[in-house]
Amino acid sequence: MTADATTPLLSVRDLKKHFPIKKGLFGKSNGAVRAVDGVSFDVNAAETLGLVGESGCGKSTTGRMILRLIEPTSGSVQFDGVELTQLGAREMRKFRRRIQVIFQDPFSSLNPRMTVGAIVREGLTIHKLAEGAAADARVRQLLDEVGLRAEYVNRYPHEFSGGQRQRIGIARALAVEPNFIVCDEPVSALDVSVQAQVINLLQDLQRERGLAYLFIAHDLSVVEHIADRVAVMYLGKIVELATSVDLYREPLMPYTQALLSAVPIADPTVKKSRVVLHGDVPSPANPPSGCVFHPRCQHPAKDEACAAIVPPLEEKAPGHWVACIKQPPTSVEWGVQKAAGGTNPPTRYLPVIATHSS
Amino acid sequence: MRSYRGSELGFVFQEPMTALNPVFKIGDQIAEVVRVHHGGSKQEARNRAVKMLETVGIPSPEQRAGEYPHQLSGGMRQRVVIAMALVMNPSLVIADEPTTALDVTIQAQILELLRELQQKFGTSILLITHDLGVVAETVSRVIVMYGGEIVEEAPVRELFAAAHHPYTEGLLNAMPQVGQERERLATIPGSVPPPTAWPKGCRFHDRCPYAWNRCLEEHPPLYQIGAGHVSRCHLAVEPERRADKHEPLVVQQATA
C-alpha cells in the first residue's frame, strides 16, 4: 500500500478471525463473534506501523494471528514472501525466530520460576544459536543493551519493577535477532516516567538494528510519537490508514476524528471543542449493517446509504486510506448511494479539533 | 463513620467490574444506599435509584435497573457506580482513577458527566489519577505525590505553566502529547524505590537532575512558592541551583 516498489516485509491480506458462539452441550454453532473481519496492511522493513482502537476492536487478535498464536479463520499473512498461514509447526518455528512479540503485562508474561538469565537464554537454546559460555556472554550482552545490569542474570522476575520487567521481555525478544516485533501494548501497564524510558529504548533498538514494529496500543499520543504510519481499527475492521503526520493533522474517518478529540490534553489553557461519541461500541457478534460505525457517526452527510453500503477502504489522498462513503472522493458513486437510500451527497467534513496549544 | 459513608462521602472506584456486586440487580444496589441512609419504603428507594440512573445518562433506566452488572458495558457500569456514589447527594466524592479502565471515547463521556453533575449538585470531587491530561482538563487544584508524601501543590494552570518540583517537571516532560512532535521523550531515570527503602534526605534525590549535598542529608519541608503553591524541594531556598543540571545519581552509579 505504500508508494515505493520494494516488497514489504510483512503483508497481511483480508485476515479474518471469527470465534463461533456455541449453544448447548454439543456446541451447535450459533453465529460468530467477528473479532477481526477482513484486515489488510503492509509493514516495511525498519518501519513502525501503529495499530490503534478501543478495547475489543480486534487489534490484539490481529497481532496474535500474525504470530499464529491464534489461528486465523481465513486470509493470508506473508512474511518476506512466505505464506505463514500454510506452514506446519516445524517450519513455523523457524519463522518465530524472525518474528517476536513483546506482551502488555510484564507481570504475567515472564515465568516466575525462571531466572532472568534462563528466560533470555531459552530462545538461544531452542533455535540453536549459542551454547555454553557463548550463550552466557550473549545473555549478558543483551541485558546490557536493554539497560539492565549483567549481574541480574540470576535474579527472578519478582525482584524487578514493571519497567525493568518490560526490559527483560524486550531482551528475550531480541535474543533470537528478529526482523520484526509485534509490540502488544508494551507500555500500557507502565507509569508515565517509565513508559518514556521504554519507548526511547524501542526507538534506539529500531535505529541500531533496522527492526520493524507492529505497535499495538490504545494510547494515541504514544502511537503518534513512535509510529511512521497508523492504522485505526473499529469493530474488527481497519477504518483509516495513513502516515502518522497525515492521520493526526487531517483525520478523515469520523471515528478517528472522535477518537482524537477524546484524548485529554495536558494543558489547562487549551479549551477545545470535543466530539463526544454517544453510546458504546456495538457487539462484534452482531455488528451494524453497512458501515459498522454508522450508528455513532457524527458526519453531517450520514444517511440511509451508510446503513446499507459497506464502505471500501479507499485512497482519498496519496497514502491516506479511509473507509467512508461520505468523504469525497469515493468510488461508491452518488447514483449507487441514492439507490441504497442515500439523501445527502458526500461532503468534506473536517471538524476543528484542537490537539495542541496555540 | 458508617453514617457518613455513602451519605456525605461518595466513592467512585477504578474497576467498575469489581465495584459492583455481580449477584444483585443494579437498581437494588443503588436503592440499598438510599434505604440505609434515608430509610423509607422499598418502592420509594427504588424510584430514587431509577431517577439517579436517568441523571447519569443511562437509557431506559426503568428497565436497566432490573439488570445485573454483567449485562452492562464498562462505561455503563462506571455510570452505575457514579449513580451509587451520588444518590444521597454527598458533599464530597472521592473518585479513584474513575476512567483508567475505560477507553478514551468512554473516558470523555464519563469526565463530561462528572463535570455536569458537579455543576448541578455542587459536589466537591477529589480525583485520584495518574493521567496528566485528565488532570489538565478536569480539575482546579492539583496535589502531586511521590514516595508517600505530597511534593507539590498548586492551582492547575500554575502547575502546568510553572512546575517547581523536579519530579513534577520530569512527569510533564515525559509525556508524549498528540500534536507535539519530539524526537525523543525526556525520561526520569531509575524507578520509584519501594516504600520500605525510601532514601535519606529528599526521597527523590537519586533521580533528580538538580540534587546537591543538602538533598542527600536534609528532608525538605513544603516550601511556600506562591499563592496556594507549595513544593517540597530545597530549590525554593536555593533557586540558583536550577542552573546546575547534571546526570542524576542513579545514572552516575549505573555507569560507574
Image (cartoon, rainbow, N blue to C red):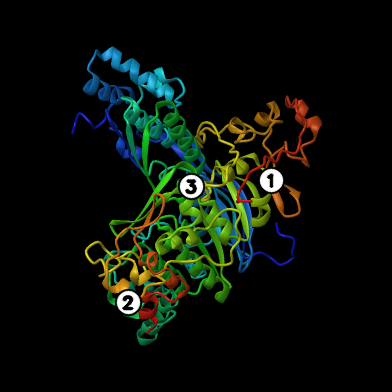
Please identify, in this view, whether the residue under mark 1 or under mark 2 is nearer the observer: 2
* B31 left or right, relative to B230: left
| Chain hosting mark 2 | B
Q: Which residue is mark 1?
A: A322
Badge 3, how many Cα within 10 Å: few under 14, some, many 20+?
Answer: many
Evaluate whether residue A335 shows in this view. yes
Quadrant placement of the N terminus of chain A: bottom right
Mark 3 sits on what residue? B136
Q: Are the residues flagged by discs 3 and 1 from a single subunit? A: no
Which amino acid does the dot numbered 3 rest on? Ala
Percent coordinates x, y for residue A163 in the rendering: 38, 64
Looking at marks 3 and 2 on the same chain, the residue that comes earlier in the sequence is marked by 3
Label 3 sits on a secondary structure element that is helix
Residue A251 picture location, percent across and down: 66, 46
Q: Residues within 10 Å of mark 1 (few under 14, many from 20)?
A: many
Determine the secondary structure under disc 1.
strand
